[in-house]
Image (cartoon, rainbow, N blue to C red):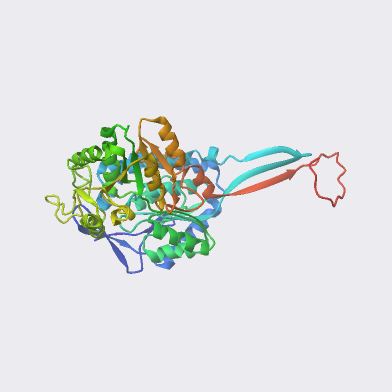
Amino acid sequence: MKTITHWIGGKPVEGTSGRFGPVYDPATGAQDTQVAFATTDEVDAAVAAAKAAFESWGAASLAKRTAVLFKYRELLDARRDEIAALITAEHGKVHSDALGEVARGMEIVELACSIPQLLKGELSTQVSTRVDVASIRQPLGVVAGITPFNFPAMVPMWMFPVAIACGNTFVLKPSEKDPSASYRLAELASEAGLPDGVLNVVQGDKVAVDRLLEHPDIAAVSFVGSTPIAKYIQMKGIEHGKRVQALGGAKNHMLVLPDADLDFAADQAINAAYGSAGERCMAVSVVVAVGDTGDELVGKIAERAKGLKIGPGTDPASEMGPLITREHRDKVASYVSGAAAQGAEVVVDGTGYSVEGHEDGFFLGVSLLDKVPVTADAYQDEIFGPVLCVVRADTYDDAMKLINGSRWGNGTAIFTRDGGAARRFQLEVQAGMVGVNVPIPVPVGYHSFGGWKDSLFGDHHIYGNDGIAFYTQGKVITTRWPDPADSGGINLGFPSHS
């Protein structure tokens, strides 16, 4: 059986714990790969390698850092099909979706390539007689990232390229469910010329996570995952004196006003709810239909949902692949099975779905629930699967009360032809990312990604300017070079700005 191991100090390191996690092909349900779980000693070795590498990498010129990053971007571009194939094999998403994931991750590598511009400081001259003040940003040291299964390449690339561009060294703990993509990213970084120890990958479970959170040599931790774990990461990290950015879960609402193009809205609801099998924190999981739009909109969504092609991610005809594990597939299905008893109308039932020739795969058909009560589990919980809830609202104000009443505030969208309504919505809605006729408003690399409320724990969003701020610390330098003609002298009074 193939074993995925660790990448420490620029080379593969075999695991010694004797503990392994299964890695499945979600399309077949078969396991021919396992991942080695790190011991605390192996985590410590990765941190030690990163700490040793920081001595030179933190002092490396911006020109050297960007040269490596440009080469890395070139290698990623050349190997994007290979990386996408690893994602499809272990996550299950269709190849085109996996390619899109790699492309969005590469956006952040491109952002990191512009680090000389992003790290430019500020200078004020002559703040007092012959006194200048400069503000600069410097790296933190060793930083860590803990990433989820749903984007095994993109989310790590949201973190480590920016961190290492700023001069830090990095320890990555990817999801144990699909570890190969992250390992390959580290190999390619080494091939691009990244010095040994600057980027390390430790595979594992809670043992590795807790050690990263406790380790005294780690200055900051980035996390993307569920809300309960994000809360844990923040509390544990702060307890041990670390800077933390922890992105949690979501229940993203898509508001559809009566003047919207309902065919366009239905198309976008399908894309946003069922793409990547709904396993993304920016998926639309609730459509809020305002006024008399509900029946027609639900009919259009149902018609499209029933025609989707579900199959293995390696099949070019597949539009949606399987879910990540059998257990997760069954959990998602339970929300649909129990929906009617909690007052919802099951319009499309995707439970019990199977693909010929892949009967043991973790497949689930798409489901559409209408008139979902806000008390139902399908509305209250983050399902993280291909289940779309429709909630009816009489007015815009009723819809806004519903959306802003959610404990999450990750992403949201409005569909309308009314510019005034759209402007009002983007100012009033309580969410970190807003789309106007855009269902999944994930920001481009030079803006930052992050939500509000229970979708974000910590002060900084990820990548963009917030990413630069998170991975650096500010320093202010006040300088005076007296004129040789100055007599100097002693003055015990408070300095003046004369």
- For the question of whether residue 193 can be seen, the reply is no
Identity of the residue drawn at 26% across and 37% down:
266
Q: Quadrant of the C terminus?
A: top right
Q: Pick whichever, 169 or 249, lies toward us.
A: 249
Q: Quadrant of the N terminus?
A: bottom left
Quarter of the image where one finds residue 449: top left
Q: Pick whichever, 135 or 49, lies toward us.
A: 135
**Residue furthest toward the left?**
356
Identity of the residue drawn at 44% across and 36% down:
424
- For the question of whether residue 34 can be seen, the reply is yes
Rendering coords of residue 417 (x, y %): 36, 30
Rendering coords of residue 298 (x, y %): 23, 41
Quarter of the image where one finds residue 307: top left
Identity of the residue drawn at 44% across and 34% down:
423
| 87 sits to left or right of 493 | left
| 459 sits to left or right of 154 | right
Q: Pick whichever, 418 or 266, lies toward us.
A: 418
Rendering coords of residue 32 (x, y %): 22, 58
Identity of the residue drawn at 35% across and 57% down:
175
Q: Is residue 52 above or below residue 134?
A: below
